[in-house]
Amino acid sequence: MKQVLLALVVIVAVASLAAVGTYADFSDIETSEGNYFDTGSLELQLGDTVPWPNVPGTPPDGPLFFSDEGYGEDPEGDSVIGTWDRMPGYPGGMQPGDCLESRVYLRNVGSLTGERLDIECANSNYDGSGNPTDVFKDAVMVIDYLIYYNSPRVDIVWTDAGGQHWNPVYIDDDDGDGRITLHDWELHGVCNLGPPLLKGACLDMRVVFAPPTDPGHPYYREDEYSGYSTMMTLIFALLQ
């Protein structure tokens, strides 16, 4: 019985193959070509300004911003360099109370809008000989204000009448000294800002060299950080 069933299966298989050959001449096959599934893109470009008070003739009641690098002008791509540069204004080095203010302009030329903008701060500190050091000079570089002009405007750091700095949303005062510094920003970052609109956005920051005068302050130094330097890098991430 098994041999009979096996023979029937073989016959049916052969018959099926024969049917394919029989109807092959009555087939018409067409194709749908040229179908591309492209993904959208995010392309963030930065521009910046010459830092105040490095611009000669700047009025004392407010900075004038002059374009430095426009969008996409940096030889390495869409980034910018030397946005907060003390050299033109303080060639001998910053002294306590000196400040730098500048702006970074942002625009997205990609096909997607993006959902949020994050900004991280990475700092490197160096001693008078140019060697890396664990002395946190970035902890005495106080952010006087940090404003993101988009829609709406966001005051990431602001002050009250008593001069205390705080922001419960973006940057925490890590050491509790009532000031927001570049060191605090490195530890906490700025997250969930609105993506740049079509007309672009702007980040405006003024940083003051303010070493504490109280010997009890965790970052007090008698030499007021003489000869030390801080290299700051801001990392802008537009995310979908």
Image: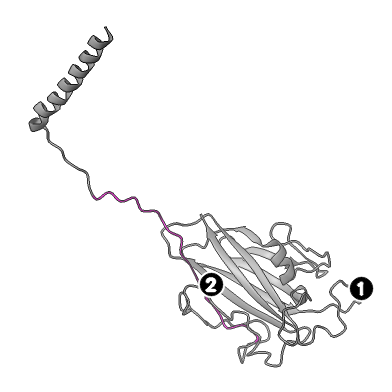
Residue under label 2: 105
Residue under label 1: 216
Which residue appears at 83% of the width and 64% of the height?
176
- Residue 116, percent across and down? 56, 57
Magenta stretch containing residue 41, yes or no? yes
Left or right: 53 in relation to 240: right
Q: In this view, does 6 lie above or below 205?
A: above
Q: Is mark 1 on a helix, strand or loop?
A: loop
State which quadrant residue 17 falls in: top left
Magenta stretch containing residue 26, yes or no? no
| SS assignment for the magenta stretch, majority | loop
Q: Is mark 2 on a helix, strand or loop?
A: strand
**Residue that protrudes farthest toward the left in the picture:** 25
Which residue appears at 50% of the width and 56% of the height?
114
Q: Is residue 45 above or below residue 194?
A: below
Give the residue type at disc 1.
Gly
Residue range highlighted in magenta = 34-53
Which residue appears at 80% of the width and 83% of the height?
225
**Residue that protrudes farthest toward the front in the picture:** 3
Which quarter shows the N terminus?
Answer: top left
Q: Residues within 10 Å of mark 1 (few under 14, many from 20)?
A: few
